[in-house]
Image (cartoon, helix red, strand yellow):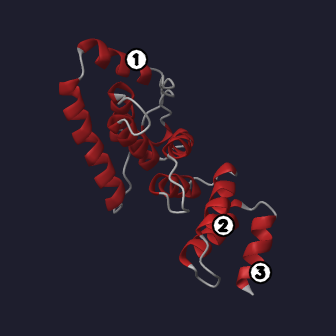
Amino acid sequence: QAIQWIGRAAAGGFAPAQHELARRYREGRGMTKDLVASQAWLDRAARGGWVASQLLPGQMLERGESGIQDIQGAMMVYRAAGQQGSAEAQFRLAQLLEAGAAGEPDNVTAYALYKNVTKVEVPAGNEDAKKTRDAAAARVAELKNKLTAEELKKAEDALKGQPSGADAKPKEPAPKKN
């Protein structure tokens, strides 16, 4: 019965219900496990502005959990979630950019994203957020030694006028040339 109510609310556009339905499909809790359906419901919840749903679709796309790995799609999801305040999404996007997962590495944008993550206020007791912030600080230190003065200035300029912390919205990187 609970699944029926969740399904009705999800179909009606209620993003928290869409997220819950996606989790249940992903875990096979109360229904047959279906990663494709899970991805679809997470996408709907994410488009509905439910920040908790915005990171998981990116991870699923990045890992290919629904049978198709889509790094570009994951990066789009992470970018959108990061612009809505997800430090974890900014961190994941920075990792992909630094690794060149979708083309040439982009250490300048990765540096700017990592730097934004270091400014996030971590709520007391949130060890995962603290680990993410600390890992971002380590990447900032390492990339600072790899980037030229001109590249560092470009990264710092990308951050000017941007709110810091959880509200940070780094500039979108330029598309890669093929």
Of the numbered discs 3 and 2, the one sitting upstream in the chain is 3
Residue at disc 3, secondary structure: helix
Of the numbered discs 1 and 2, the one sitting upstream in the chain is 2
Rendered location of residue 73, percent (x, y): 55, 44
Q: Amino acid at mark 3?
A: Gln
Label 1 crowd bin: few (<14), some (14–19), many (20+), radius 10 Å? few
Label 2 crowd bin: few (<14), some (14–19), many (20+), radius 10 Å? some
Front residue (pair 93, 115): 93
Please indicate whether residue 45 sits to the left or right of residue 12 in the image: left
CA–CA distance between discs 3 and 1?
50 Å
User: Could you tell me if the residues under marks 1 and 2 are in contact, i.e. CB atoms within 8 Å?
Assistant: no
Mark sitting on residue 157 = 1
Mark sitting on residue 4 = 3
CA–CA distance between discs 3 and 2?
16 Å
Select label 3 or label 1 by which is in front.
Answer: 3
Select label 3 or label 2 by which is in front.
Answer: 2
